[in-house]
Amino acid sequence: MAYIDCFLAPVPRANRAAYEALARVSWEVLKDHGALAVTECWLDESGPDAATYHGADARQASDAYATFIGASGAKQDETVVLSWVEWADKAARDAGMDKVTADPRMQFGDGPMVFDGARLVAGGFLPMLRRTAST
């Protein structure tokens, strides 16, 4: 069964291009160590209101809902990146991530900090349902 690593990261808006460059390097490293797919998403801050995700009978005032900005702890000058990595299974993930974190291409200590990794929210997930328009 597939395994998904999910990440929520507050990123300074001014660092979007640097984050995108980091994401491209990360994809190459992840792919080289067994990841099947990576998706990186920059928050659409003008996107739909949270209330629009609920039926009329369950809908609350917009400010009653949690936000990705709040969940990530993003500061005034930051937005949020949501990303996930798909692996064939948990064993492939565990073996792959050991290699990813040791890979020299993932050692960014001498470059400018794109985002604060200590504030990264991460977790592993077991898919329950995955459907596409063709399935």
Image (cartoon, rainbow, N blue to C red):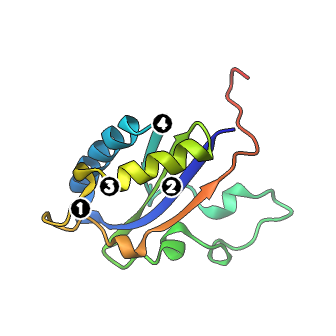
Q: Real-space Cα distance between discs 4 and 1? A: 23 Å
Judging depth in this view, the residue of 57 and 68 nearest the camera is: 68
Give the spatial CA distance, label 2 vs label 4: 25 Å
Q: Quadrant of the N terminus?
A: top right
Left or right: where does residue 35 sit relative to residue 67?
Answer: left
State the residue at coordinates (75%, 71%).
Answer: 60
- The three-letter code of the residue at mark 2 reads Gly
Could you tell me if the residues under marks 3 and 1 are in contact, i.e. CB atoms within 8 Å? Answer: no
Look at label 1 and name its amino acid: Asn
Element carrying mark 2:
loop
Asked if disc 3 and disc 2 are in contact, CB closer than 8 Å, the reply is no
Q: Dot 4 corresponds to which residue?
A: 37
Select label 2 or label 1 by which is in front: 1
Per the rendering, the mark at residue 47 is 2
Q: Which residue is mark 1?
A: 15
Q: Where the C terminus falls, by quadrant?
A: top right
